[in-house]
Image (cartoon, rainbow, N blue to C red):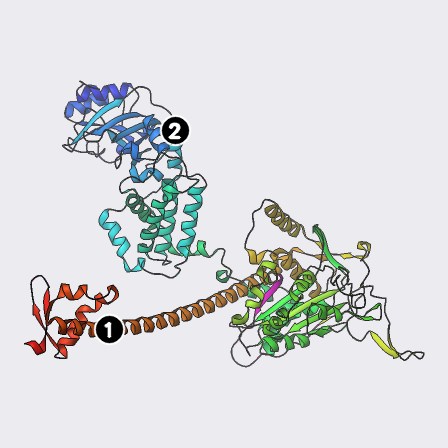
């Protein structure tokens, strides 16, 4: 276009396929001549173009980029060598019109748009703008509106396709991308009181982790920052942490990332000037468009304590559930805590030969563990006691307190000489307070926790290392075990410190509270839920054995009025009663299995969550007086129970963590106070010593300069010199003669 006038250049652009618009001299506004609706008025018709320039030969030329099938990157804030290498290499491929005399890289880089692009710059925003669908650029030979500016084509020819690196930039652009904040607007954003809240200070760690992961997985520091900063500022707008914290920590992390292993070799060892601030100004503008409530909902989507649980839908789903809730309220206990104990009692009267299908590994056991969570005296024991009245079973449930791992076995069998005598095959173990379990666990050589973990899975119990006269063998799926434990949140470390072994993952947690109960007088008692005997299988709990004296040798022997239990014999799968499950349950287990096989693990504390939910579903089936198939409704109701458990567990863990933090803070403060006292004592000792030495040296010299006096003191006493002199002046022992620039001399007073 060199040497052409404005009219001739406009006609040449149109002939080359560009839609053009006239603009007023000194303006970049594409509607400054044609007015509103300019997007539909651009033209490459020579008659229309001549008509425009007949009106004013000094009109400038605007190229309608998007309508002409192009997209333009306007590099405005950096040199090419300051950009990530892939972006710089991409721009170098474009047809280029420079716009500044003092920056050989600043200008417009044009590419063919093979799809519609808006004017959102995405990851390119910190370095400039993008002109797409309804974007325009002012073109040579139009005079630039600024004195230092000049439009000139430095690369021409066919416009190339859009490089992949630049396409990735645009993929991060929103259709309604906001313009970056101005410097003043960004300052106001950071200093706004509502952006100084600190409700979730640890939340920034998640954003920092996303940034680090993106960079160390081969991404560029720039692209990772463009992704992370809008996320961080959205959380600032939601009150999670202060904007100042984001600026400080994200900026330092961004700088550090240029030295990290694994980052993209983008040709840079440092960011472009003001790159962080430019990204931050853009990111803050995007964050202001977000709804803080939606941001919090996103953050809380995996937080069990924030999950909305439709408890009424659970209790009203079946008559027996409503009856149990009403029974709990009539006894003034928490419905969920009593229900947890009812689950344990219901499962305790299902024969051990009733198993879950072998959908993963082998057949699953129904053995179930429950934790009732509350501070001391707040309903754990009363909930368990109410559950005994709320559910009538045949046979009655046998309850016992666990001892060590070996003690558990003795509830099922004992040794008479070399023979194993089987007593029962179902026990509900109860622990009123978690401290009792802790005491048993902490005994030297205790095997309690490993035995509980095996029992939950229905695995073989026993100790192969024991002597023959003490060796027990209780084979898998030959016994039923359930457990109810009272847990004080502040003492729950007994369970959670065994998380690596998988113990707390096997428990269901229930609260003793009932904030939604009807207020006023307690409701009437609806009566107990009754369960008849399970129709098949062998179940022996209490009162099924008789004791007599052998007439020949006087020893006690036991006889059984039922089929022998054969606890030491391997259970034959042919004798199992395998519960059928709905397809939705199979699908859920398959999905979890696939994730585990892929190495995609979820929350450690939920590692047995699907199996725990399935056990609850089986118990709900039984409470509904069915014995063959776990239905989709059982599964859905069990999901509500599991949500209550997850929430209660998360609150318990949070309470435990808060107590630990308070304890650590208290210890730290106490240590700090001790250090302050120690430091003060040392400081006073040094002050006293410095005062004595100053008096001695002044008296000896009669008159001495501050510099000479300071040199006579040991290094650790020199900081106390001025204070020591002040003490002696106040005591009337010495006088001070002021000199120049803060110097002085000290004179022993008796000499004056």
Spot occupied by residue 503 in the image (x, y as percentages of width and height): 61, 62
Any part of residue 69 in sight:
no
- The answer to whether residue 641 is above or below residue 122 is below
In the picture, which quadrant includes the C terminus? bottom left
Foreground pick, 627 / 381 = 381
Spot occupied by residue 696 in the image (x, y as percentages of width and height): 17, 74
Judging from the image, what secondary structure is the residue with disc 2 in?
loop
Q: Residues within 10 Å of mark 2 (few under 14, many from 20)?
A: some
Q: Name the side, left or right, on which 399 lies relative to 650.
A: right
Residue 141: name its quadrant. top left
- The answer to whether residue 110 is above or below residue 438 is above
Q: Name the side, left or right, on which 385 lies relative to 546.
A: left
- The answer to whether residue 633 is above or below residue 370 is above
Disc 1: which residue: 689
Foreground pick, 394 / 729 = 729
Spot occupied by residue 455 in the image (x, y as percentages of width and height): 70, 62
Cβ atoms under marks 1 and 2 closer than 8 Å: no
Disc 2: which residue: 163
Magenta segment, which residues?
506-529
């Amino acid at each position: 276009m060199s040497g052409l006038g404005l009219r001739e250049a406009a006609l040449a652009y149109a002939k080359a396929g560009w839609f053009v618009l006239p603009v007023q001299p000194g303006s970049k506004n594409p509607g400054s001549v044609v007015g509103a609706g300019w997007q539909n008025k651009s033209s490459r018709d020579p008659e229309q173009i001549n008509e425009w320039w007949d009106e004013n030969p000094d009109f400038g030329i605007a190229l309608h980029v998007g309508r002409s099938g192009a997209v333009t990157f306007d590099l405005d804030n950096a040199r090419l060598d300051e950009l990530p290498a892939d972006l710089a290499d991409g721009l170098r491929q474009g047809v280029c019109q420079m716009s500044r005399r003092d920056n050989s890289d600043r200008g417009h880089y044009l590419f063919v748009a093979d799809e519609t692009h808006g004017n959102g710059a995405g990851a390119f925003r910190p370095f400039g703008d993008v002109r797409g669908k309804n974007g325009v650029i002012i073109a040579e030979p139009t005079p630039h509106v600024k004195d230092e500016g000049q439009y000139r084509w430095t690369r021409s020819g066919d416009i190339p396709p859009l490089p992949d690196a630049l396409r990735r930039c645009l993929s991060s652009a929103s259709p309604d991308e906001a313009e970056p904040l101005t410097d003043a607007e960004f300052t106001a954003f950071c200093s706004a009181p509502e952006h100084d809240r600190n409700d979730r200070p640890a939340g920034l760690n998640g954003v920092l982790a996303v940034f680090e992961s993106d960079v160390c997985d081969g991404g560029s520091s720039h692209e990772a920052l463009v992704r992370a900063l809008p996320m961080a500022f959205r959380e600032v707008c939601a009150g999670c942490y202060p904007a100042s914290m984001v600026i400080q920590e994200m900026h330092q992390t961004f700088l550090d990332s240029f030295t990290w292993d694994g980052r993209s070799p983008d040709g840079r060892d440092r960011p472009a000037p003001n790159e962080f601030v430019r990204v931050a100004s853009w990111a803050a503008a995007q964050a202001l468009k977000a709804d803080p409530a939606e941001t919090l909902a996103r953050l809380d989507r995996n937080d069990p304590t924030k999950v909305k649980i439709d408890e009424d839908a659970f209790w009203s789903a079946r008559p027996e559930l409503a009856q149990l809730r009403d029974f709990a309220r009539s006894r003034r206990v928490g419905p969920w805590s009593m229900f947890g104990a009812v689950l344990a009692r219901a499962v305790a009267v299902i024969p051990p030969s009733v198993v879950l299908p072998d959908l993963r590994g082998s057949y699953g056991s129904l053995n179930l563990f429950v934790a009732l969570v509350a501070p001391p005296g707040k309903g754990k024991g009363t909930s368990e006691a109410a559950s005994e009245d709320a559910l009538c079973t045949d046979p009655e449930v046998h309850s016992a307190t666990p001892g060590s791992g070996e003690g558990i076995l003795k509830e099922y069998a004992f040794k008479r000489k070399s023979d194993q005598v089987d007593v029962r095959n179902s026990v509900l173990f109860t622990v009123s307070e978690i401290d009792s379990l802790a005491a048993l666990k902490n005994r030297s050589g205790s095997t309690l926790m490993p035995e509980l973990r095996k029992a939950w899975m229905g695995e073989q119990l026993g100790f192969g290392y024991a002597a023959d006269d003490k060796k027990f063998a209780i084979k898998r799926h030959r016994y039923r075990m359930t457990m109810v434990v009272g847990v004080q949140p502040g003492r729950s470390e007994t369970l959670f410190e065994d998380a690596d072994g998988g113990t707390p993952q096997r428990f269901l947690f229930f609260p003793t509270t009932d904030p939604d109960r009807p207020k006023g007088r307690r409701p009437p008692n609806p009566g107990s839920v009754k369960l008849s005997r399970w129709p098949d299988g062998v179940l022996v709990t209490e009162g099924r054995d008789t004791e007599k004296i052998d007439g020949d040798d006087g020893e006690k022997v036991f006889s059984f009025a039922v089929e022998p239990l054969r606890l030491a014999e391997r259970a034959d799968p042919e004798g199992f009663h395998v519960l059928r499950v709905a397809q939705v349950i199979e699908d859920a287990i398959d999905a979890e299995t696939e994730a585990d096989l892929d190495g995609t693990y979820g929350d450690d504390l939920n590692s047995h969550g699907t199996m725990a939910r399935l056990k609850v579903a089986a118990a709900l089936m039984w409470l509904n007086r069915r014995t063959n198939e776990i239905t989709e409704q059982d599964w859905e109701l069990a999901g509500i129970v599991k949500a209550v458990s997850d929430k209660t567990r998360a609150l318990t863990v949070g309470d435990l963590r808060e107590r630990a933090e308070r304890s650590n803070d208290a210890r730290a403060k106490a240590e700090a106070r001790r250090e302050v006292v120690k430091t003060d004592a040392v400081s006073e000792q040094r002050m006293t010593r410095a005062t004595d030495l100053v008096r001695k040296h002044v008296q000896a010299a009669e008159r001495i300069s501050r510099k000479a006096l300071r040199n006579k003191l040991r290094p650790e006493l020199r900081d106390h010199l001025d204070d020591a002199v002040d003490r002696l002046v106040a005591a009337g022992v010495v006088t001070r003669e002021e000199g120049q620039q803060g110097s002085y001399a000290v004179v022993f007073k008796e000499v004056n």
